[in-house]
Image (cartoon, helix red, strand yellow):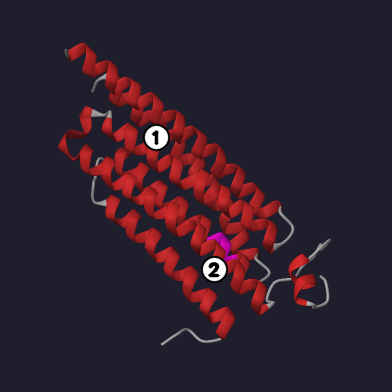
Amino acid sequence: MKMDIELLNWVLVIAGQILVAIGLFCDFVAAILMIRFPNFYVRLHALTIGSVGGAIIPAIGAALIAAGSPFLGNFRWFLAGGALVAALFIFILGGSGAHAIARAAYRSRTVKFKPCYINQLAEDKGEDEC
Amino acid sequence: MNFLETWVTNFLTISMFIYIASFLLYLVRLFKGPSIPDMILAIDALGFDLAAFLIILSIVFRSPILIPCAIVLSLWIYALDIYVAKYLEAKEMGE
């Protein structure tokens, strides 16, 4: 029985570490792309990599690690639950916040369209392209 | 200190350095950003990753008090998004 629980702890810790490693990769790639991408609308893609891949997946992985670590004592359940709640909040709020800021940036014309190849929204509205 | 504890602590301690390196790269975009929405994008990514970083820190330091900080930080980042979007569209902060 003790052997089984120890094996279960190891499975949880290894699964959590794989998720945290994926999150580290996504986070570093998003940080590089945030510098390298040319304009605002392409940088939205880097933001999505950074918030979904770099924050939600490591939070779920940290919850699994915390659930499988008996040396943390009794508060590890609090830690796992809080990490899952934080992941849920980032999942809901990250996407809607990015949409709000993109819509406001387009309608207020504060960002430049360089380089611009096609702008179908302006075509539909009858405005000048690019 | 058994083997599991050493393994988990070492892994999370190494992962902290990669997080800090990517935070520094986000700060480059934050200070360099040509317009306000670019800076807001950098702050967004920085804040959400900081929330995940706080969760990892709470395992490394064995202190559960950092978990509510992560939840509240993600809510504040969303509030910043909405305020800046409102300001850009209507040129006022909303009463």
Residue A124 visible in image: yes
Contact, mark 1 vs mark 2 (Cβ under 8 Å): no
Report x, y in % for residue B93: 47, 84
Q: Quadrant of residue B48?
A: bottom left
Q: Amino acid at mark 1?
A: Leu
Report x, y in % for residue B16: 44, 40
As drawn, the label of residue B49 is: none
**Residue in view at x 56 percent, y 68 percent:** A101
Q: Amino acid at mark 2?
A: Ala
Vertical placement of residue B65 versus A128, above or below: above
Quadrant of the frame with the N terminus of chain A: top left
Q: Is residue B41 magenta?
A: yes
**Would you name the residue on which mark 2 appears?**
A100
Q: Residues within 10 Å of mark 1 (few under 14, many from 20)?
A: many
Question: Mark 1 to mark 2: distance in Å?
Answer: 34 Å
Q: Nearer the viewer, mark 1 or mark 2?
A: 2
**Residue in view at x 54 percent, y 74 percent:** B85
Give the total number of marks visible in the rendering: 2
Give the letter of the chain under mark 2. A
Residue B61 visible in image: no
**Which contiguous range is marked in magenta?**
B39-43
